[in-house]
Amino acid sequence: AQKVTQAQTEISVVEKEDVTLDCVYETRDTTYYLFWYKQPPSGELVFLIRRNSFDEQNEISGRYSWNFQKSTSSFNFTITASQVVDSAVYFCALSEAEYGNKLVFGAGTILRVKS
Amino acid sequence: GAGVSQSPRYKVTKRGQDVALRCDPISGHVSLYWYRQALGQGPEFLTYFNYEAQQDKSGLPNDRFSAERPEGSISTLTIQRTEQRDSAMYRCASSYTGTGVKNEQFFGPGTRLTVL
């Protein structure tokens, strides 16, 4: 069964600190995709990244980086030198090829960055 | 437009009324998805379409909920005889393909449904 766990309900940091958001997933499929979405206070859901199960390379995009480890079923998200504008709810999600790409979301992590 | 659009953005209705929520996906996107998001939670899958074919409706809560995408573009989610527990944000998303490359889903702004 598909399941995504984001154990951190809420994280507060001070601007310029680095912060890592954890995501652990469960799947029995060998072909699957992992995603991160950002939901700022305005409410929209913004796509950040997609990773497929065959590509364990870490990825960096500006201040954002993602660490995908199949051995621990984790897909963690790090923000370097956080900024107030990073304050949002961050969702990790999983889709399995067998189930036609429907997304299963974690409960989300609220990130508060204080100036 | 460039993104997914949904209408209305807000809908207030009385218990027992029917409502229709509309989604206009990104042009050229094959797949269209409906999710429901309660306050403080992640979105939950309702149903999805590839072109006009409804591929999976396993997430629809009961038979009061239905969806269609007759011409493979715009989709309508209909809730009949609304109940207070139907109050939530209803989100639509589209993706270029259903699986494989370019399967990332882009979400619309959502329709906030309030049932009194």
Image: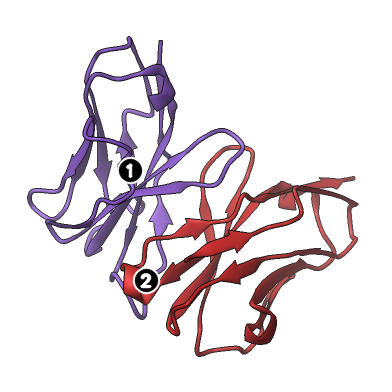
Badge 1 is on which residue?
Answer: B5
Instruction: Indicate the secondary structure of the residue bearing disc 1.
Output: strand
Q: Position of residue A53 (x, y in %)?
A: 51, 84
Residue at image location 12% in from the left, 56% down from the top: B52
Check the rendered structure and report the hue given to chain B.
purple
Q: Are marks 1 and 2 in one subunit?
A: yes
Badge 2 is on which residue?
Answer: B103
Circle 1 crowding by C-alpha within 10 Å: few under 14, some 14–19, many from 20 = many
- B89 relative to A53, above or below: above
Q: Position of residue B58 (x, y in %)?
A: 29, 51
What kind of residue is marked 2? Asn
Compare residues B65 and A35 and report the one nearer the observer.
B65
Q: Position of residue A22 (x, y in %)?
A: 73, 65
Give the image quarter of residue B14: top left
- A40 relative to B99, above or below: above
Compare residues B8 and A9 and report the one nearer the observer.
A9
Circle 2 crowding by C-alpha within 10 Å: few under 14, some 14–19, many from 20 = many
Residue at image location 62% in from the left, 49% down from the top: A107
What kind of residue is marked 1? Ser
Q: Position of residue B12 (x, y in %)?
A: 37, 15
**Foreground: disc 1 or disc 2:** 2
Q: Is residue A85 left or right of residue A82?
A: left
Letter of the chain shown red in the rendering: A
Give the image quarter of residue B27: bottom left
Residue at image location 27% in from the left, 42% down from the top: B23
Q: Is residue A110 left or right of residue A80?
A: left
